[in-house]
Amino acid sequence: MGSREVIYYHDHLLVKEPGTRERTPWHHDQPYYPIDGEQIVSLWLPLDPVDRATCVEYVKGSHRWGRWFQPKFFRQGGVDLAVQDARFEPLPDLDAERERHEFLAWDMEPGDVVAFHALTLHGAAGNLSSVRRRRAWATRWCGDDARYAARLGQISPPIDGHGLKPGDRLECALFPRIL
């Protein structure tokens, strides 16, 4: 991140059971969060072996496009979150534009990790394995320049009780400084 400090933001467990057809839609993480700044990183760590076809795909260099796309709930139908921000625009049809971008994905083992900027576009196929789960632990980390930014409407995950005001550094009891 190029940061002198590291603030823990949040984590979640991602599970795709065998035979899951629903894909994780294309998105980038930062528009979901009430955070502005460049020093925001996501770590994706598989807890099961993951083949390239089931791994998250990343659009190389998309974090440098200078664009913020509208967040969506991760469920069938993918309705837009009620977030209003002039920076958020509709997501292009990345699957229709595959020849225009470089997509990155890997065969991964438990303990491998992918670190990516919070504005990197990514998505994943379903889990077409008939026997193996695809579990991963995702964590989010912020650096020196990360500031609380009130968003109009919903954020994900919904986080209350932090006491931060727009422009505040994230460090607080809910978001501890790790380093």
Image (cartoon, grey):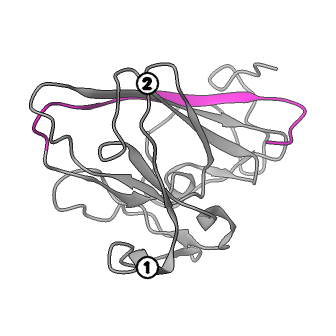
Stretch in magenta = 1-20
User: What type is the residue that disc 2 sits on?
Assistant: Glu
Task: Label 1: state its secondary structure.
Answer: helix
Q: Residues within 10 Å of mark 1 (few under 14, many from 20)?
A: few
Residue labelled with disc 2: 109
Q: How many marks?
A: 2
Q: Residues within 10 Å of mark 2 (few under 14, many from 20)?
A: some
Question: Which of the two residues, 80 or 1, is positioned nearer the viewer here?
Answer: 1
In-image side of 64 versus 82 (left or right)? right
Query: Can residue 79 be found in the magenta stretch?
Result: no
Q: Earlier in the sequence, mark 2 or mark 1?
A: 1
Quadrant of the rendered image containing residue 150: bottom right
Looking at the image, is 132 positioned above or below residue 153?
A: above
Residue at coordinates 32% horizontally, 65% vertically from top-left? 80
Residue 161 is at least partly visible in this image: no
Task: Label 2: state its secondary structure.
Answer: loop
In-image side of 34 versus 133 (left or right)? right
Query: Can residue 7 be found in the magenta stretch?
Result: yes
Looking at the image, is 104 positioned above or below residue 170?
A: below
Residue at coordinates 46% horizontally, 49% vertically from top-left? 105
Quadrant, the N terminus: top right
Where does residue 27 sit, x and y in percent of width and height? 43, 59
Where does residue 13 sit, x and y in percent of width and height? 37, 26
Where does residue 157 sit, x and y in percent of width and height? 44, 39
User: What type is the residue that disc 1 sits on?
Assistant: Glu
Quadrant, the C terminus: top right
Residue at coordinates 13% horizontally, 31% vertically from top-left? 18
Residues marked 2 and 1 touching at CB (< 8 Å): no
Q: Which mark is residue 99?
A: 1
Where does residue 109 sit, x and y in percent of width and height? 43, 24
